[in-house]
Amino acid sequence: MQMTDQHQTNSAEVDLTQTVHNLAYRLISQAGQRVSERLTAYMALPHQLNQLNADIVAAGQLDLNNAIACEQHLWRLAKIFPSISYIGFALTDGSKESGAGRWIERTQLSVYENRNFKGCDYATDEQGNRTHLIQSYDYDALSQPWHKQALEAGKPIWTHIFTADIDDVEVADEESVQPEDTSSNVGYQNYVAVNAERPLYDKDGKLFGLAIVDVLLSEISKFLGTLKVSPSAQIFIMERDGMLVGSADEHSIVHRVDGRLERFNALNTPNLAIRSIAEELQKRFHSFQTIQEQQFDFSLNGDRQFVYVTPWQEEYGLDWLVVVGVPKSDLI
């Protein structure tokens, strides 16, 4: 009788364990697929806006030499789409660049003009008109590697992820400066982005400009933070070399080294759960480069960690890994 009772107890424990495992794998795979679907929609908008702007310019409805007209057009788009960090145009001769967006914390929407390599950020009123200068700085936009990459490609692309560290900024509006800011990084202290860029051609097929939308990694992290899976779930995105793109814990993405902003690799982030998951992925598959859709579990601090990883790719060249991790303790 005792052996039968023990057998029934063991069988029940096995059934419970299997039920928890099935629940965990279903939860993380659904979460991973949801992240991929929403990421596809989220990252489609920048290229759609670039196509829209290219069509408007080609139709002669906007003169890129008219800075005020460009600013107000871009300001209206940035207002309509609050996920846009920066949207702009640049002429390939370097003479002019216009933009609008949300790169200065205390300013709802700013506009930007770069004329002959002098960048200026302006606050705006409710109609998108300039109200006052916030800051100015020397800046050669087209010398930046990400813009060169787009010009060389000659077609719509995503650029490499980049950090905008701008020096020698002259601050005109001290009220827009955050307490932790210095005069050399107002609005740019955490500017790590990936750009959607589209070359612009005239009717003779001559390249004359770029349509640009910046996607800040901090915005991708905020987006991931809105996805609720479980109390202690880890949701993160990384490149194929392990460099982090976004995380529901946005503080795990970037840090400063000798005053310069750098991204963490998933293998050296201070977030223990992300780091442990990345180490387990590397141990199991030897390289992030070849990982396809997978799910597995492993022990982390005495708890089982259930992990789902899937590639996320799109037509303009991004190839990222979406990773979801849920501890067993969240499920029982």
Image: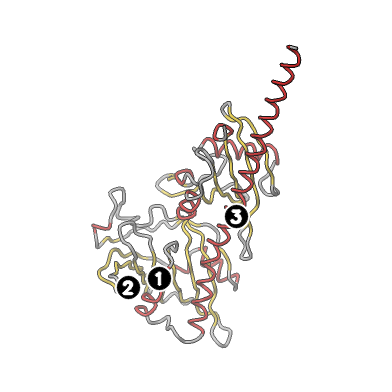
Classify residue 263 as left or right of residue 171. Answer: right
- Determine which residue is flagged by label 3: 36
Classify residue 180 as left or right of residue 58. Answer: left
Q: Is residue 300 above or below residue 325?
A: above
Q: Which mark is residue 81?
A: none
Residue in the image at 39% along x and 58% along y: 166
Q: Which amino acid, mark 2?
A: Gly
- Determine which residue is flagged by label 2: 128
Q: Is residue 195 above or below residue 192?
A: below
| Residue found at the very far top of the displayed protein | 2
Residue in the image at 67% along x and 34% along y: 19
The quarter of the displayed image where residue 168 is located: bottom left
Q: Position of residue 3 (x, y in %)?
A: 75, 13
Q: Which mark is residue 99?
A: 1
> Which is more N-terminal, label 1 or label 3?
3
Q: Which amino acid, mark 3?
A: Ser
- The local secondary structure at tag 2 comes to loop
Q: Nearer the viewer, mark 3 or mark 2?
A: 3
Q: Which amino acid, mark 1?
A: Gly
The CA distance from mark 2 to mark 1 is: 12 Å
> Which is more N-terminal, label 2 or label 3?
3
Classify residue 175 as left or right of residue 23. Answer: left
